[in-house]
Structure formats: structure tokens, C-alpha cells
Amino acid sequence: METPNLEFSSSSSDENPLLNEENRKHDRPRGGKKPPRCLRLFSILCFLVLTGGIGIMSFLLVKVIFNKEGTNNAEEALGTKSNPSTLTGPGKPTSRPTSGPTVLLREPSGDPREEKILSISGNLALQEGTPQRKAVSWIMEDDAMKLEPHDPRFIPRYALAVLYYALDGPAWNTDASFLGPNDICNWNTNIFRDGKPVFVGICCRDKTYVNCIVPDDNSAAERIEIFIGNNNLKGSLPAELTEIINLVGISFPQNAISGALPRSIGRLQKLYKIDLFSNQMEGEFPSTLYDLTNLQNLSLYGNKFSGTISSRIEKLSKLLYLDLGHNDISGTIPDTIGELKILEYLFMESNRMRGVLPTGFFDMTNLHWVCIASNLFTGNLSPRIENLIHMRVFDLYENRFSGMIPGEIGSLGNLENLRLHVNNFSGLIPTTIGNLSNLTRLFLDDNKLSGNIPVQLRKLTNLEYLDLYGNNLSGTIPEELGLLSNLKGLDIHDNELSGVLPSSLADMDSLEELNLSANNLGGQIPAAMWWKLEQMIKLDLHSNSFSGTISTRIEEMGSLQLLDIEENFFEGSIPNGIGALSNLEYLFLRSNDFSGNVSQSICKLVLTDLWVDCGATTQGVHCDCCTRCE
């Protein structure tokens, strides 16, 4: 640190009040005799020597202090900061005007406990109002255990007290017996959420708890884990937490913790779990995070972390669960991620990550669930995807992937959810998708796919939701789709499909939502669809060329909430049976060839929107309750 330049300048006799004759007259004792000239000169000389000596000594003292402790400590030594008292006594601040707030410090008392704490927290333990100072006061004055500094329980107890004050302990929903008179292993409680007991507090190995078990690593040392979720924790994680060397788990999900991860986090070499899910933490990941080589679970979802993922992530080779979703992380996925050979769950959704998926990505053959959605990833999906044979959920939606969906994807026999929507995939839907017999959700919508809907999809008998809308698919709707008896949602709107509806659609008796709008479909609706699809909630057929009439048996679709058949060629009267659909909220019938009246039974429904051709001059519909007329 640079030593301040302290200048000592001399003045002429005319400017120096000590050498000015007039001033000297007034300074001498009243009624005294004027001293001899030689004596006066000797006195002046002595004064100058003494003044110069004091100035030089002061300069050397300031220099030593600055070199040893820095500017702040030098200011304290010169009296420009508060005058400290003892650690436990009342403060006696002495201040002078400064450009910022005065920091009130206390002088160490020499207590061995205090000396131990100072070696950890430094001046924060002396500064009024800090969590460290509050913890010092508690452990030295109020703590019933009165532990000595050589006791291995002393440092963990102090560190947890700092944690309590740093995270606004007095405002917690439950204090979990923190700062109680017992051992820290008793600082816990069970609270009930949704009728189930939830453990909150400190969990130690070899202790019996409800809903808390600390993993055993066959060592003799104590193991400590902290679970404090959804408990109104506010503030930053203190560095003192990393002094608990036997800490194996940190879990503070669903709180309001802010600030950065302590840079000393790497000291906790026994950590197997960090769960900070849904907080307000920020900053880049400290490099020491990658030193936690025993880490199995890292959940940082729903914070404000930024920066990039280091290639050193390969050191976390024991990870089973990695969740970095919903942060502000940028950069690419490093190829070294492939060294996480036993990783099962990988979540990186809703960040600002970019680039192509590295080769190493497809070396993580133990992956069960991947979600890297809502980023800026680009490039093709590699055929090496066939290596991920344990994959159950694969979410790549809302990125910029392009090229064809590789046929090798059909090798993922355990796949249950495949969500590739909102990308730039092109080409045909691979027929090998029909091999994914465990698939329950297939979302390929909002891409640039073309060709026909593969008939091989009939083999997906466990499929519940199929979204193919917003592509360039053509041809007819395969009759084989009717075999998907478990399908609840079928959305293939906004394509170029043509032809008539297959009658097999009426056999999909689990169907709740059917959207075929904005295609080139025509002909009459299979009659059985109006009464067999009793589970139907939303039926959207608008902007096609359907014709014919609406069956009077539509009243049997008792679950229907939305019926949209506008912009077609339906004709005849509007069935009174629609009035029996008590759950109906939206009814869009405009731009058809209906005639007659909208019945009073329909008008009695509590509809949010009713739109028919009631404004037409010929072949129009008379309506007394429509919200809009065409």
C-alpha cells in the first residue's frame, strides 16, 4: 500500500507566530521582566528542536502503521476514528467530520475466546451492528454452554450464531431452537406444511430425527447438515459458515438470501449437497466452488447468478444432480462436462447460454433428465444422442437448434418426454419416434418440419399429449391416430393438412383438447365425435372448410368449455342442446351459414364470449345475448 506523503514545511520569521515580536510580547508572563536576548534565542532553538523531533517521530509512526495495517488502521492510531474501549464494555466513540459514516470498533480484550474469533472474523467481530459482533456478544455473555476456544464445538457454535444474525434470525418463521442452551445438534424442529412434518434446523449424524438422515461416510468425525427451507431467511451467507469443516450439507431453498457465494466455499471439502433453490443470490461462481470434489447435489435454480461455467466443472465428477436453471448464466457448455459420467439430472433452462452442444455432452451416458430450454443454443442435434439410453426427459425447447431431428433418437427407449418445440428443426418427423413406446409427451410444434404425420406414431400407446402445430406438415390426418386411446391433447393447428377427419378420432375417448384450426381440412365432422368425446374441454376447428350441421347430441359433451368452429361452412340452425353445456364459457360460431335464432337456453349460460353472424342481413342469426356480432 502506498504510504501517504506527509509534508513538513518551515516558515519565515515573518510568518511564524513563534518568531513574531508582537506575539512574543503577549505570550510572556504578565508583570515579568524581559529575559536576556541569549536566553530568548536558546529557548527558541530548544522549541524548534523539540517540535521537529516530534514531527519526525509522528511521521515514522504513521509510516510504520500504514505499512503494517493499511490506511484504516493508521487512521485509528492517529485518532481519526472512534476511540475503542474494551470488547464487552460500553463504546466511547470519539469522531471527527469525515466523508463517510464512522465505523465503531472495539478494542480486543485479550479473552482467549475472543482471540479465536478474531482469527476467523477479523475486525467484523469488533464492529458494532455486524452479525459477527452480535454472535460474539451472545457466545461470550449469553450462551449457557460457556465453551472454551479449544473445544471443537466452539467454532461451529459461533459460526452458526453468525449465520443466524446474518440471515435475520429474529424474523424467521420458526427459529428452529437456534441459540438455544443445548448442543447445536438440538437446534431444530419439525413444522407441518400441507399436513406433513418438515425438518428445519441442524441435522447431525448419529442422532435420531424425524425426516433427517445425514449420509454416513464411515468416518469417526461428526457430520453436520443444515436444512432451513421456506423460512423467511434474508441477508447474505457469511464466510464464517465455511469454518464448519464437518459441514456436509447446506440447504436453504425458497428464501430471500442475497449476495454472492462465499469465496471460501471450497474449504468445505466434505460437502455433498448445496441447495439454494429459489433465492436472490447473485454474482459469478467462485473458482473454489469447483474444489468441492465430493459434491453430489448442486441446486442453484431461481437466483441471479451470472458469468460462465468453467471447464473446471470436470472436477465435480461425483455430481448426480446439477440445477443452474433460471439464472443469468452466459457462455457455452464446456466440453469437459462430459467427465460427469454419473450425472443423472442436468438443468440449465432460462439462462443466456449459447453455442452448440459439445461432444462431451453426449458422453454423459447416465443422464435421466436434461432441460436446457429457453437459451440461445444453436447447431444440429448430433446422432450421438443414441448414447443417452437412460434418458427419460429431454427438453431442448425455445432455442435455435436447426437441421433434421436425427433418427437415432428412436434408440432412447426409456424416453417419456420429448420437447423440441420452438426451434428451427426442419425435414421430416423421423419414423423412429414410433419406437419410443414409453413416450407420454411429444412436443415438436413451432419448427419448420414438413411431410406427413408418420403413421408409426400409432405405436405410442402411452402418449398423452401430441403437439405438432406451427409447422409445414401436409397430407391427411392418419386414421391410425385413433389408436392413441390415452391421448388427452392433440394440437396440429396451423399446418397444411387436408382431407376429411378420420372417424377413428371419435374413439379417442380420453381426449380433452383437440385443435385442428388453420388447416385445409374439410367435409363433415364424424357424427360420433359430437357425443362420444365426453371428456372434451376445448374443441377448436376454426379456419378450415368443414361443412354440414352440428349434431343435436352435442349436449352430451358436458365438460366442454370452449367451442370454436368459426370460419367454416357449417349450416342449419344452432342446436338448443348447446344450452345444456353448463361449463361452456366461449362459443364462436361466426363466419358460417347458420340461420334462425340463438335460443334462450343458450342465452342463460354464463358465457364470457358469444360470437355469431347476428349482424348479417341475409341468412343471418337473430341473437339477443351475443357479446359480438359479425
Image: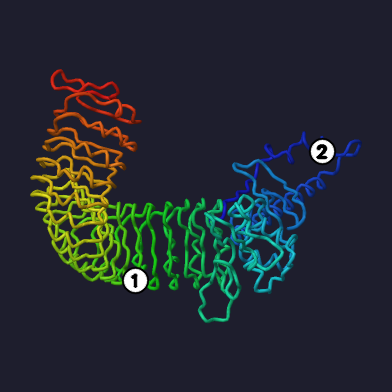
Residue 461, numbered label: none
Tag 2: amino acid: Asp
* Element class at badge 1: loop
Question: Image quadrant of residue 295?
Answer: bottom left
Residue bearing the label numbered 1? 340
**With 416 as the anchor, is 37 left or right in this view?**
right
Pointer 1 local density, CA inside 10 Å: few below 14, some 14–19, many at least 20: many
Task: Work out whether residue 461 or residue 89 is closer to the camera in this orientation and state it.
Answer: 461
Residue 542 coordinates in the image, percent (x, y): 18, 37
Question: Image quadrant of residue 584?
Answer: top left
- Residue visible at 50% across and 52% down? 258
**With 69 as the anchor, is 371 left or right in this view?**
left
Outermost residue toward the right in this view: 31
Task: Work out whether residue 264 or residue 205 is closer to the camera in this orientation and state it.
Answer: 205
Residue 416 coordinates in the image, percent (x, y): 28, 62
Residue bearing the label numbered 2? 27
Task: Work out whether residue 613 or residue 384 is closer to the camera in this orientation and state it.
Answer: 613
Pointer 2 local density, CA inside 10 Å: few below 14, some 14–19, many at least 20: few
- Residue visible at 16% across and 28% down? 594
* Element class at badge 2: helix
